[in-house]
């Protein structure tokens, strides 16, 4: 997801570094791995101003009751982290693992299923996983066992320019708890009256259809990890809707991620739909302060399990099989799964919205956002997150997404949707061997 690989923070200055080496923490070393002592944990994570900043604050909080405790944080871009895990699994040199490592949610099952020897579970941790949205814990749950502690939220929002809506005779309430058919109708009206599309997206990206799919608890894989792209009614409906959004002009496609960000920053579109992390990019347009609002997503028409809630992105903490699993789970349990103080601290400066539901009850989350017209947007997002349906990702999720994205490009160009999705299914089955 883009939250993890391209716009890795919720503030203007927080862009994922491409050539990062090691992070600066009280316990940072030269990038070595493994646990260095009974009171020390080594962690792999990316993004200094977001994930690593959160770790440093968590370290301070845990040190209040464990004064000898230190973290050795090794800044590791996601692509490098994935490569390291693959190499370690193939070489069986598990002593090279850190105690804790961060995982993209959509890649969690792929790694935990393919490389089970690298992971420890949280069965004896005492962490109450019911305090996280079930749709989020499902990413790191294998056969009913939890292998990850959810961290930042990928909960999706509809963000809209209220001044554009007002010009067309609408308010944010008119786009709350609606269906995609209603969204399309109103979007066409806004476009006709203001000349502004309500949406933009990167051509060749399946982000929006995948959010549509998850909002109904559907997936492109079944519970056994087999692809269900061909003959998938929810997917067909999602791609039909996306195609209509594009053809109607309500959604404008661009060629790159930077162009996508530019569409709402420069005001050429009147909104966006994405994970909550997108608000950091929105807020770089200082001249638009007070002119935005957020609400939930449209839901798929005619689908019994459809909801107005979905997700795009997010990450979870894993503990390795070769580190100090007991200390690691205790540290995560007292901080990322148990400290309102931690989330209150990191929210204002990094925008790191919690998946831990109790965090949403704090006064910090309830603070109104001037940029978003006084809405307590972070409190809203925690509420939304608790309602996001779970879906199956499995081992070949990214191969499936890529196949669907390629099919969408053909379908928008005029190809038959049924045969295009059948071809996509075949491509994924081939990739699976």
Image (spheres, rainbow, N blue to C red):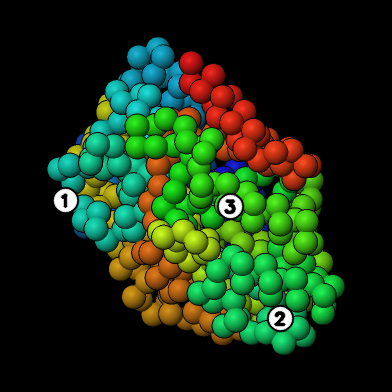
Q: Name the residue under label 2.
A: 165
Q: Residue 256: where, in percent of width, then height?
A: 76, 46
- The numbered mark at residue 413 is none
Q: Which residue is drawn at 71% across and 41% down?
A: 411
Q: Residue 338: where, in percent of width, then height?
A: 27, 60
Q: Nearer the viewer, mark 3 or mark 2?
A: 3
Q: Residues within 10 Å of mark 2 (few under 14, many from 20)?
A: many
Q: Name the residue under label 1.
A: 126
**Number of marks in the image?**
3
> Is tag 3's residue or tag 2's residue first in the polypeptide sequence?
2
- Name the image quarter holding the N terminus: top right
Q: Which residue is drawn at 54% across and 73% down?
A: 178
Q: Residue 128: where, in percent of width, then height?
A: 21, 56
Question: CB atoms at circles 1 and 3 under 8 Å apart?
Answer: no
Considering depth in this image, is 118 or 77 the residue closer to the camera? 118
**Alpha carbon of mark 2 to alpha carbon of mark 1: how far?**
48 Å
Q: Name the residue under label 3.
A: 238
Q: Residues within 10 Å of mark 1 (few under 14, many from 20)?
A: few
Considering depth in this image, is 406 or 4 the residue closer to the camera? 406
* Residue 147 quadrant: top left
Q: Which residue is drawn at 25% across and 33% down?
A: 120
Q: How crowded is mark 3: few (under 14 residues within 10 Å), some or many (20 or more)?
A: many
Under circle 2, the secondary element is helix
């Amino acid at each position: 997801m883009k939250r993890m690989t391209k716009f890795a923070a919720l503030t203007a200055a927080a862009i994922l570094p491409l050539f990062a080496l090691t992070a600066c923490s009280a316990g940072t070393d030269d990038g070595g791995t493994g646990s260095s002592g009974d009171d020390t944990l080594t962690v792999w994570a990316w993004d200094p101003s977001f994930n690593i900043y959160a770790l440093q604050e968590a370290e301070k909080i845990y040190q209040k009751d464990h004064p000898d405790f230190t973290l050795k944080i090794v800044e590791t871009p996601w692509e490098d982290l994935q490569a390291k895990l693959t190499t370690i699994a193939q070489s069986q040199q598990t002593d090279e693992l850190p105690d804790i490592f961060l995982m993209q949610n959509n890649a969690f099952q792929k790694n935990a299923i393919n490389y089970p020897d690298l992971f420890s579970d949280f069965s004896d941790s005492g962490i109450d996983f019911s305090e996280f949205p079930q749709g989020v814990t499902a990413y790191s749950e294998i056969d009913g066992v939890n292998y990850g502690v959810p961290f930042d939220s990928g909960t999706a929002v509809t963000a809209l320019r209220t001044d554009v809506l007002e010009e067309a005779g609408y308010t944010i309430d008119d786009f709350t708890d609606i269906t995609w058919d209603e969204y399309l109708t109103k979007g066409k009206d806004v476009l006709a009256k203001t000349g502004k599309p309500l949406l933009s997206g990167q051509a060749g990206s399946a982000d929006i259809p995948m959010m549509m799919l998850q909002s109904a608890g559907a997936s492109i894989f079944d519970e056994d990890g087999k692809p269900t792209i061909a003959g998938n009614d929810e997917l067909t409906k999602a791609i039909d809707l996306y195609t209509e959004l594009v053809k109607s002009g309500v959604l404008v496609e661009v060629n790159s991620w930077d162009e996508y960000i530019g569409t709402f920053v420069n005001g050429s579109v009147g909104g966006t739909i994405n994970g909550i992390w997108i608000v950091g990019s929105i807020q770089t347009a200082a001249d638009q302060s007070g002119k935005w609002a957020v609400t939930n997503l449209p839901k798929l028409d005619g689908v019994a399990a459809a909801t107005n809630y979905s997700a795009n992105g997010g990450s979870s903490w894993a503990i390795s099989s070769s580190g100090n699993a007991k200390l690691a789970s205790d540290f995560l349990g007292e901080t990322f799964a148990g400290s309102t103080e931690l989330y209150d601290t990191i929210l204002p400066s990094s925008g790191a919205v919690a998946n831990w539901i109790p965090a949403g009850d704090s006064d910090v989350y309830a603070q109104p956002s001037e940029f978003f017209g006084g809405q307590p947007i972070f409190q809203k997002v925690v509420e939304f997150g608790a309602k996001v349906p779970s879906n199956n990702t499995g081992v070949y999720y990214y191969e499936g997404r890529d196949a669907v994205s390629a099919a969408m490009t053909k379908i928008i160009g005029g190809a038959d949707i049924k045969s295009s999705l059948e071809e996509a299914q075949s491509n994924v089955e081939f990739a699976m061997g």
